[in-house]
Image (tube, helix red, strand yellow):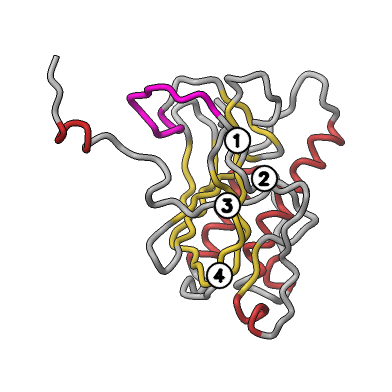
Amino acid sequence: MIYSSQRAQAIQKKDIAYLAAGIHDNVVLESIRVDKSLNGNNFIEFKFIAKDGKFMTHTEWEPSKSDNMSDEDLQRKCDNQFARIDQILECYYPNPEDRVFNGESFKEFITWVAEKLNNADKSTLLRIKVVYNNSGYTTLPKYAKYRFIEPMTIVDKNESVIVKLNIDQFEKPVIADFEQSNPNPLLSNESFTVVDGTLDNTNNADPNGLPF
């Protein structure tokens, strides 16, 4: 075995460049990515970055139907997911007529979303709410009925409606530390599930927790 300060310093550290949970101003949407996981699950990823270089990614996955889920429940998940993503779109397309979409597949939907956002002015400054999921990763909230993103022009007019809610998890959950050779959840062999279209780890018994 070799003990080396250089080798130790080369280990990827957590929380160094990531936006912490809370409400952040003057953030921009840096990039949008539509892709498929190693297990064939379609997703869209939004990367937000602050002026100091700290960033956060939010991933939306194709909702899946569990054994005990009705068609109505699945449709409700899809509607909530659309509403969440529509909050992001609204920052660049405030006119509802510019955000009209009707399609039959999640892949078709996220391709349209990515095209709209890639054609938008991504230098638009934003206020966003960042929370922790049950796996200890920062993300946008799962809910759709409360505002979690808005342009800074709204904030500058003192019309912001983003507030901290009791249901928001701003404290990082305590998770037992363990070594892992691959910190990228997209390449992990862990057990994951999609909760309301967002990604959460399920290695603990928590039902709210990355899917594959």
Q: Secondary structure at mark 2?
A: loop
Q: Where does label 4 land, which residue?
A: 25
Residue 169, label in figure: 2
Residue visible at 56% across and 31% down?
Answer: 210
Q: Where does label 3 land, which residue?
A: 21
* Residue 90 at x, y percent in the picture: 67, 69
**Spatial separation of the CA atoms under disc 4 and disc 3:** 12 Å
Q: Secondary structure at mark 1?
A: loop
Residue 99 belongs to magenta span? no
* Residue 164 at x, y percent in the picture: 72, 58
**Spatial separation of the CA atoms under disc 1 and disc 2:** 8 Å
Image quadrant occupied by the C terminus: top right
Q: Where does label 1 land, which residue?
A: 173
- Residue 149 left/right relative to 119: right
Density class for disc 3 (Cα within 10 Å; few <14, some 14-19, many ≥20) is: many
**Spatial separation of the CA atoms under disc 2 and disc 4:** 19 Å
Looking at the rendered structure, the kind of residue marked 1 is Pro
Give the residues in magenta.
175-187
Of mark 3 and mark 2, the one earlier in the sequence is: 3
**Spatial separation of the CA atoms under disc 3 and disc 1:** 12 Å
Looking at the rendered structure, the kind of residue marked 3 is Ala
Residue 135, label in figure: none
Tag 3 and tag 2, C-beta contact below 8 Å = yes
Tag 1 and tag 2, C-beta contact below 8 Å = yes
